[in-house]
């Protein structure tokens, strides 16, 4: 069935709606960080236990996004979006009243799953209803709003804590959700092209969660300096879970993510770009405060200024990158963004010493922030438009899952490399080692950008099907081939 759309869709209304849905997940991800000490004290927890409020949230977001996007493709994106908003509202109210830490973690995971429904379906609604020559700009604006929410989360959290209890953080989402529900009600209904319904593979989902949890625990154990035999046993356990997950994805009719989309060259390039740039960005964001405190002996105010400036520049340049993507193609801004990130990381590595000036650090981080802003929106656009509209939700969910995987890996790897320093002064060579990895990651992102298409062309080429006899043999439909390759 061919989708029918309003003659003049209200793009401003649609952009406002999807932006509101997009800010909920990152806002609730970062503003809780400022409240972790208070929550730890109230429930008498260890440092490792309370961090699961963040880790569990990120893992749930990563796992649930492909399923949320697929549900939108199958039963309707606006319907699933409305359900996600209502669920987020319910979990937010309940979390504010949680009497125990375990229930609070469970409700936070519920928030993450609801947010995971909103992100890919919002991106898919933009893909199916917005004009193709505006999609880069709209995704750039969306990314700018999301980045601003993530950067502003700690400030909002601090203001809420100054007014009272950490429990005040969760009701802050209620006005955003209510406004989004009002806008969704005003949005013109769109008859969507849908994919056949398939059952959710709960076994595969459970294995996916187990894999991320085991890897997170293992990286945390690295930081704690666990013994060799115990460490080897845990890595073997992680390998066994990974093997079981891969096997399950090969035999199930409804895998956790639409892995076949990776056979589309532009989707693979764009998704790899998203993972690599997010890995480089999050590693840098988490590295700088440790360097400022442990090496330079300065306070969190300096770190906040540096990272805030980096985030603001990324948010400001994201719409510019989107406009470049609409005018000159998706590949150019993605490549330019990765080159700027690499240049900023190289300069940071070259000038890193104990008395490096704050101004120099700011200049390097500015390059990284501009690179993220210029390239991310273009890569996101390329990922969701390189497959047919009927699979836009699955594509958005899968690529966004890889973005969160980059965040989890960045946090985990840094935790494993940076050892706790009893003397209060870390070895600068450790920071240089991590930055070398950041440079390599950003350079790989530049290489991945070469596989991204320039401009979309009419959907006409089938997505590569699975081999005969494979459980995933049914075709995925039509793909949108690259132009100018």
Image (spheres, rainbow, N blue to C red):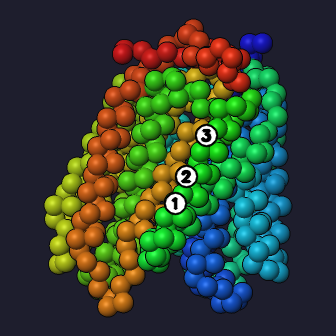
Whole-angstrom CA distance, mark 3 to mark 1, is: 16 Å
Q: Which one is in front in this view, the residue at disc 3 or the one at disc 1?
A: 1
Mark 3 vs mark 1: which is more N-terminal? 1
**Res 331 quadrant in image:** top left
For disc 2, the neighbor class at 10 Å (few under 14, some 14 to 19, many from 20) is some
> From this viewpoint, which residue is outermost toward the front?
229
Mark 2 vs mark 3: which is more N-terminal? 2
Q: Secondary structure at mark 1?
A: helix
Residue occupying the point 77% across, 40% down: 201
Q: Which residue is mark 3?
A: 246
On the picture, is 99 further left or further right than 169?
right
Along the line of sight, the residue nearer the viewer: 92 or 141:
92
Q: Which residue is mark 1?
A: 235
Q: Which residue is mark 2?
A: 239
- Above/below status of 29 relative to 248: below
- Above/below status of 231 relative to 87: below
Q: Which one is in front in this view, the residue at disc 2 or the one at disc 3?
A: 2
Whole-angstrom CA distance, mark 1 to mark 2, is: 6 Å
Whole-angstrom CA distance, mark 2 to mark 3, is: 10 Å
On the picture, is 467 further left or further right than 425?
right
Along the line of sight, the residue nearer the viewer: 468 or 220:
468
For disc 1, the neighbor class at 10 Å (few under 14, some 14 to 19, many from 20) is some
Q: Secondary structure at mark 2?
A: helix
- Could you say which disc has been placed on residue 44 in the image? none
**Res 252 quadrant in image:** top right
Residue occupying the point 62% across, 19% down: 466
Along the line of sight, the residue nearer the viewer: 401 or 48:
48
Residue occupying the point 19% across, 68% down: 352
């Amino acid at each position: 069935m061919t989708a029918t759309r309003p003659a003049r869709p209200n793009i401003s209304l649609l952009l406002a709606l999807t932006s509101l849905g997009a800010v909920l997940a990152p806002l609730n991800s970062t503003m809780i960080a400022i409240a972790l000490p208070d929550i730890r004290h109230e429930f008498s927890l260890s440092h490792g236990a309370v961090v699961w409020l963040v880790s569990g949230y990120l893992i749930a977001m990563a796992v649930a996004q492909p399923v949320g996007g697929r549900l939108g493709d199958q039963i309707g994106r606006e319907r699933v979006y409305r359900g996600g908003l209502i669920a987020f509202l319910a979990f937010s109210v309940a979390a504010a009243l949680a009497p125990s830490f375990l229930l609070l973690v469970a409700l936070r995971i519920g928030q993450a799953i609801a947010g995971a429904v909103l992100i890919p379906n919002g991106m898919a609604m933009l893909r199916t209803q917005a004009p193709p020559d505006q999609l880069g700009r709209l995704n750039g604006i969306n990314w700018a709003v999301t980045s601003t929410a993530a950067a502003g989360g700690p400030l909002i959290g601090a203001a809420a804590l100054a007014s009272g209890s950490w429990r005040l953080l969760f009701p802050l989402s209620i006005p955003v959700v209510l406004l989004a529900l009002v806008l969704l009600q005003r949005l013109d209904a769109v008859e969507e092209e849908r994919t056949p319904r398939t059952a959710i593979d709960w076994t595969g989902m459970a294995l996916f969660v187990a894999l991320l949890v085991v890897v997170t625990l293992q990286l945390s154990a690295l930081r704690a300096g666990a013994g060799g035999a115990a460490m080897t046993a845990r890595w073997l356990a992680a390998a066994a879970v990974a093997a079981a997950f891969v096997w399950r994805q090969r035999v199930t009719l409804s895998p956790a993510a639409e892995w076949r989309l990776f056979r589309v060259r532009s989707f693979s390039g764009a998704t790899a770009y998203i993972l690599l740039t997010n890995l480089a960005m999050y590693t840098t964001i988490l590295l700088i405060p440790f360097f400022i405190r442990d090496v330079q002996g300065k306070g969190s105010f300096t770190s906040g200024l540096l990272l805030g400036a980096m985030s603001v520049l990324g948010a400001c340049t994201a719409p510019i990158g989107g406009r470049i993507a609409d005018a000159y193609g998706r590949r150019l801004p993605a490549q330019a963004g990765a080159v700027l990130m690499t240049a900023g990381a190289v300069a940071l590595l070259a000038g890193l010493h104990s008395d490096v000036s704050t101004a120099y650090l700011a200049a390097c981080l500015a390059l990284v922030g501009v690179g993220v802003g210029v390239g991310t929106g273009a890569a996101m656009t390329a990922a969701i438009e390189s497959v047919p509209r009927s699979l836009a939700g699955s594509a958005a969910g899968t690529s966004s899952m890889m973005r969160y995987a980059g965040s989890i890996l960045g946090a985990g790897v840094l935790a494993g490399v940076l050892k706790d320093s009893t003397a209060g002064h870390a070895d600068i060579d450790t920071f240089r080692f991590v930055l070398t990895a950041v440079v390599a990651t950003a350079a790989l992102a530049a290489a991945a950008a070469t596989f991204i298409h320039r401009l979309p062309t009419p959907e006409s080429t089938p997505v590569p099907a699975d081999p005969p006899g494979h459980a995933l043999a049914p075709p995925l439909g039509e793909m949108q081939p690259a132009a100018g390759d």
